[in-house]
Amino acid sequence: MTSRASQEGSASLLVLAGLLLCAAAAAGGVLVIEFALAGERRSGRAYEARMALIKETARVIALLADDETPEADSPSDEVWRRIKEPSLEGAEVGLEDVSSALNPNWAQKSVFEKTELKSLLKGNDAADELQQRREDKGFSMDLDAAYGDLFEESALPTYFTAYGYANINTTDEFALRSLYALRTQDAAGAEIFHAKVQGLLQEKRMLTRERLRDFLGTEYDELFPVMNAEPIMNVHFMNHRVLRELLAYSELKVPDPDAAAAALLDAAGEAELGEEELKGLIGAPEESRIYQYLGVNTWFWRITVRRGTASARTIVARVPVDGGEPRKYMIVEQRTSP
């Protein structure tokens, strides 16, 4: 157990339930946490250094929110040029997409069983065990501790993430049931909701963002945006192997997976893709679930600011909003050191 003293300068929401609560409660524009530095003299140099790092972090969040092409995120956005010119003298700023990967807390076991992503698992029963372990022990932000024995060495940090929302079309049905119960504290309602999800699966219907509110019903405010119908990964930043395997997933009905992968990788490397351009390059039917996996927006970012021996690491979530509304961001985790 980490001591209280060693956590000075830290404001963290690593527990998944806390992350979900914060994401569901987010409102307004850019939200920046002002937090106390436990045991730290506010007049001291260490405090001032940390506040300078946090101020630079807030500048990066503002740049993300002010993106001139809000319909997509890509390396061509202005934020990437601006972070190379920090307002804090001597600082180094890093920005990383941390949500454009598969999340073991949500992943359907079929995505492993029916693609070559099964090679990332240890043994033929690992996909079943992953599903059952979530049922038995709940979700976890510590992927290595919770699921490390189920995956090949280095697979988790390379191909997976603990950050991301639960898209109803791509999330395991039993994980959705557990998540519903966690968010609403209504076990009976979770069973009813599970039956609705099973109906979608049996009828092979995809839930669209336009139908989401009706589908979630009276529990919409408790479940959204933690549950949504937004594409979970940004093709501009995702791992190429995962991209190719998802395109080759036969149930997603991509007509020419190899050609689609080549076209996407070429196009995303040269310019920012919009949602319609993405669909044109993939070529799957409009109702294909591939468009629930692959999109052009990033939902969670890691911002790192360093100056000398001091550093600040911040996880920022973009909160899904209705069309036409400005971007919303919130801090879900922030740590400073030393």
Image (cartoon, rainbow, N blue to C red):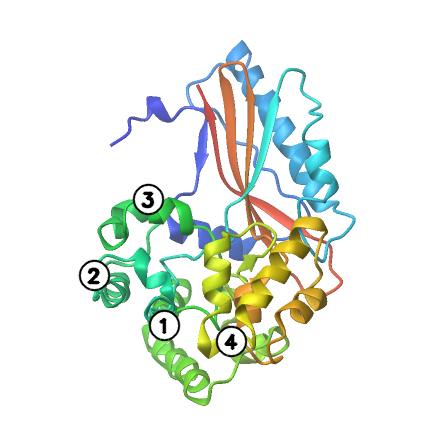
**Label 2's element?**
loop
Tell me the amino acid under the disc marked 1. Answer: Lys
Residue 131 falls left or right of residue 259:
left
Quadrant of the rendered image containing residue 195: bottom left
Quadrant where the image shows the N terminus: top left
- Say if 214 sits above or below 95 in the image: below
Q: Assess disc 2: are there few (<14), some (14-19) or many (≥20) residues with their C-alpha within 10 Å of its C-alpha.
A: few
Q: Which residue is mark 4?
A: 216
Tell me how far mark 3 sits from mark 1, CA to CA.
22 Å
Outermost residue, right side? 68
Q: Name the spot of residue 178 as percent of width and height, x first.
A: 34, 67
Mark 2 / mark 3, whichever is N-terminal: 2
Mark 4 / mark 2, whichever is N-terminal: 2
**Label 3's element?**
loop
Residue 143 falls left or right of residue 44:
left
Mark 3 / mark 1, whichever is N-terminal: 1
Q: Assess disc 1: are there few (<14), some (14-19) or many (≥20) residues with their C-alpha within 10 Å of its C-alpha.
A: some
Whether residue 128 is visible to the viewer of this picture, yes or no, is yes
Q: Which residue is mark 3?
A: 154
Q: Which residue is mark 2?
A: 123
